[in-house]
Amino acid sequence: MVAWKLPLIVAAIAVPIVAAFAIAGPGLGFAVGALVAVAILVVAARQQPRGAIVSSPAEDTRRHLLVVVSRPVEDAAAVRAIADRAVAQGDEAAADVLVLAPVRIGFLDRWTSDLEPARRAAQRNLVISVASLAKIGVRAEARVGDEDLVQAVEDQLRSFPATEVVLATGQAEVDPAGEAAAAELESRLQAGFSRVVVRDPAAG
């Protein structure tokens, strides 16, 4: 779940109950609370389990590497880890590499409908990441994707026949969305999956 959805869900649950208590007292407040609880149970019961994420079939025998970056990849260790998966292996040619950067839209950006800063940040992540890979000989295409990391992967795999997906995120404490996405992708992806943790430059 993207970060901006949680406050809206909490508000949708809390506001009717609080309003009912304030306007009509405990009787109506408890009744509204019960209705909200029933609505939550109905919605939860209707949720379908999310199935496997399948990549589109390849038209060649090359390896296809999808690199999804939640932040700019310029840390030397992270760049090398990605490059190791992209370079030629034995009799296999170097992989076809696509770098994907989700547009990470903040709550205030969405509230004000100002999405341009998020798009610029995604473009910056792409430029830095692709340039870092190019410096050590890995050529890659670049695209911007959905704000949700998992959805971005699922959307891209409809057209890009990835044989492996690499998710590049920050450490868990600074990138909780990346941590959650890694766990979900590991359980749902049918293609190979690995995660690369990008060191925070501020950590020295």
Image (tube, grey):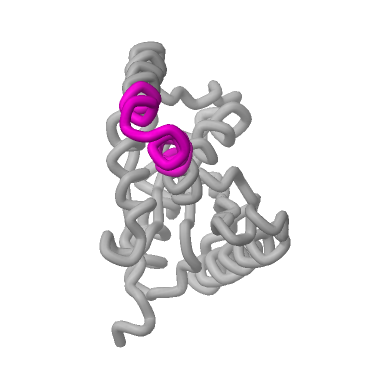
Task: Give left or right: position of 69 versus 126.
Answer: left
Residue 55 in view of the camera: yes
In the image, is residue 185 above or below residue 105? above
Task: Give left or right: position of 88 versus 187.
Answer: right
Quadrant of the snapshot with the C terminus: bottom left
At x 54%, y 49%, the residue is: 97
In the image, is residue 132 above or below residue 116? below
* Horizontal and vertical percent position of residue 172: 27, 60
User: Is 45 in the magenta?
Assistant: no
Quadrant of res 120:
bottom right
At x 34%, y 13%, the residue is: 45
At x 38%, y 19%, the residue is: 35
Quadrant of the snapshot with the N terminus: top left
Name the one closer to the observer, 118 or 127: 118
User: Is 16 in the magenta?
Assistant: yes
Residue 1 in view of the camera: no
Residue stretch rendered in magenta on the structure: 9-33
Q: How many marks?
A: 0
* Residue placed furthest toward the front: 24
Query: Main structural element of the magenta stretch: helix, strand or loop?
Result: helix
At x 45%, y 23%, the residue is: 54
Quadrant of res 115:
bottom right
* Horizontal and vertical percent position of residue 101: 56, 54
Task: Give left or right: position of 52 versus 187.
Answer: right
Name the one closer to the observer, 119 or 98: 119
In the image, is residue 38 above or below residue 186? above
* Horizontal and vertical percent position of residue 21: 38, 37
* Horizontal and vertical percent position of residue 122: 61, 61
